Image (tube, rainbow, N blue to C red):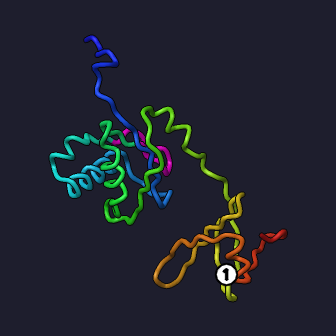
Amino acid sequence: MKHLSPTLRENRRYVLARITPPDFESDTRELYYAVSDSITSLYGDCIAAEVHAATILREGEYVIVRCRRGRETELCSAIAAIRSINGTQIRITAIATSGTIAALRKKIRPKEAATAITCTIDAEEQSGLLYADGKIDLIRRDMKGQELVYLTKDDMEKFHATTTKPDGI
């Protein structure tokens, strides 16, 4: 079968989005269903058919979603409206839009290496991860479960927190 020339092909746009929390596990099919349901609930079946969204690629915390040219705004707003997949609370944020997948792959940041630390805040031991740029992901555990708290060096100084690392923060 002969391919269509570029002038006769349907123009598409690709949207790069970040999934929070980064360790959320799902396959592209579940993401596709979530995006499709979100577009349909926001705009209806006719606009959903015009958007023609498809999940192309998932790399770590990033996902690339395809749509027809001119319908990027509908896709981005539908992506932002997704709050949970399979009962897991998530947030998906659109980062960039492009005409090629290669351009979006350049914008995907590699996962940063983190060092495990233990912090003392208000005489309570807390475990966390320290990144090279000074950000700290504090994992706060209590009887209700655990929650992730994001801190910076300034926040740590404000709380008068200390770490068990010899050089401090």
User: What residue does disc 1 label?
Assistant: 125
Q: Nearer the viewer, residue 93 or 32?
A: 93
Could you tell me the amino acid type at mark 1?
Glu
Q: Give how far across and how far down residue 72 sits, in percent.
A: 34, 44
Residue in view at x 72 percent, y 57 percent? 132
Q: Nearer the viewer, residue 104 or 117?
A: 104
Residue in view at x 77 percent, y 69 percent? 169
Which residue range is magenta in the image? 55-64
- Specify the principal SS of the magenta part: strand
- Count neighbours of disc 1 (C-alpha within 10 A) and say few if under 14, some if 14 to 19, many if 20 or more: some
Q: Is residue 27 left or right of residue 142?
A: left
The question of residue 145 being in magenta is answered with no
Residue in view at x 42 percent, y 33 percent? 99
**Which residue, as the protein is rendered here, is positioned at the far top?**
2
**Which residue, as the protein is rendered here, is positioned at the far bottom?**
123
Q: Is residue 162 left or right of residue 96?
A: right
Above or below: residue 126 compared with residue 85: below
